[in-house]
């Protein structure tokens, strides 16, 4: 079973703890057994909401079309806010300052076209690592997925560490090597090397035994560039001035500036035993690909099936509890109305109400 959370796990857990703590407090303070039961059910509802938001999923257990004796190309892309720094030349279409991530997209498309016939996988990392595209020989699908990559939502950003994808990549690469031992594997790491957390970067050396080549590609300048904020959606008014991430260590605050760290990138390349290349705008990828050859692919058909989502089961339970809560609330409103209704006038003894 795996999790596909709708938001960063730490945020979901934090919100759930706040709601659950309030419900538990009201449960303990409730004067009647009926109220205690109601608040206990609300605690259960909060837990169910958390589990639904985590989206538990059973991966597909089928085997899709597989290529043996071929080349696997793994792309690991840094999508932290620093990759939105505007220090990668000028956008040829708009004339605006280009971001580092725009350079990554162009290079992924060029490498994919150069290695047509290989299998490709796209992995991104910021506060979490996600495999965006599983291994596929459909280069067009990979390019399409890469073309819409965006920086992480600024609100969720809490510092970056360049070694975030190591554990996930180790799992993915080791699984691939076990299932397809005849394939060769290369890894291209795209990033700026900026480490904003206080801890030193971890090592990538554990990935080297699975690789037959690749490269570390660096983006950015020592002078650096500012980064626009990203809310996760397109701006309501595209003509409105851009909002930039701020550096609040100054008074008044100024636009934060991100700078490439080639020392860190060089260390990653050394640990992976692959070359490091500083990428410049509109330069060919030939030096990056080198004499790498795809080789002959032998395709075996298969049916990968589909993953099994489990959140809907929890949704049914949550719906039943919500229905019970609605019935309880309507019953309480009925009691309040009856208690507040004016009493009927008392009859006049021995006479009529009027003449």
Image (cartoon, grey):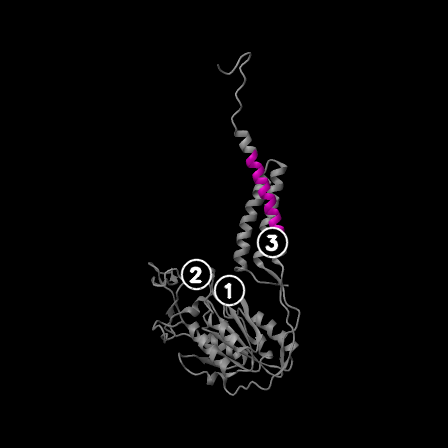
Residue 251 in the image: state x and y as whole percent. Answer: 33, 58
- Front in this rendered view, residue 178 or 117: 117
Residue 127 got which mark? 1
For residue 149, side relative to residue 302 (left or right)? left
- Front in this rendered view, residue 164 or 303: 303
Quadrant assignment, res 172? bottom right
Residue 333 among magenta residues: yes
Q: CA distance from mark 1 to mark 2?
A: 15 Å
Q: Which residues are magenta?
A: 316-334
Pointer 1 local density, CA inside 10 Å: few below 14, some 14–19, many at least 20 = many
Quadrant assignment, res 227? bottom left
- Residue hosting label 3: 315
Residue 84 to residue 301: above or below: above
Q: Residue at x 49, y 81 (%)?
A: 113
- Front in this rendered view, residue 149 or 267: 149
Q: CA distance from mark 1 to mark 3?
A: 27 Å
Examine the residues drawn in magenta and state their main secondary structure. helix
Residue 55 in the image: state x and y as whole percent. Answer: 59, 59
């Amino acid at each position: 079973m795996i999790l596909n959370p709708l938001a960063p796990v730490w945020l979901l857990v934090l919100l759930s703890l706040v709601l659950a703590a309030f419900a538990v407090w009201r449960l303990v303070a409730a004067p009647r057994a009926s109220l205690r039961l109601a608040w206990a059910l609300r605690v259960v509802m909060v837990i169910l909401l958390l589990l639904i938001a985590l989206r538990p999923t059973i991966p597909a257990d089928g085997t899709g079309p597989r290529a043996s004796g071929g080349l696997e190309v793994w792309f690991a892309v840094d999508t932290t806010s620093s990759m939105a720094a505007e220090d990668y030349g000028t956008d040829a279409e708009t004339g605006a300052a280009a971001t580092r991530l725009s350079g990554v997209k162009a290079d992924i498309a060029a490498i994919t076209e150069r290695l047509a016939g290989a299998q490709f996988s796209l992995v991104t990392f910021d506060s979490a690592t996600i495999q965006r595209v599983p291994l596929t020989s459909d280069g067009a699908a990979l390019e399409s997925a890469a073309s819409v990559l965006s920086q992480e939502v600024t609100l969720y950003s809490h510092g970056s560490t360049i070694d975030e994808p190591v554990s996930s990549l180790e799992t993915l690469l080791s699984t691939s090597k076990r299932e397809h031992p005849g394939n060769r594997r290369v890894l291209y790491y795209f990033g700026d090397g900026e480490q904003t957390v206080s801890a030193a970067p971890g090592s990538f050396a554990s990935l080297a035994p699975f690789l037959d080549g690749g490269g570390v590609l660096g983006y950015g300048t020592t002078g650096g560039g500012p980064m626009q904020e990203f809310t996760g959606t397109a701006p309501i008014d595209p003509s409105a001035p851009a909002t930039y991430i701020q550096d609040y260590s100054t008074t008044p605050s100024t636009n934060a500036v991100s700078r490439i760290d080639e020392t860190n990138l060089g260390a990653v390349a050394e640990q992976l035993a692959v070359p490091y290349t500083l990428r410049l705008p509109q330069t060919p990828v030939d030096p990056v690909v080198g004499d790498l050859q795809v080789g002959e692919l032998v395709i075996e058909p298969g049916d990968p099936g589909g993953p099994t989502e489990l959140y809907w089961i929890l949704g049914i339970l949550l719906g039943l509890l919500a229905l019970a809560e609605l019935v309880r609330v309507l019953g309480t409103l009925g009691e309040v109305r009856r208690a507040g209704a004016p009493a009927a006038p008392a009859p006049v003894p021995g006479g009529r109400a009027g003449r």
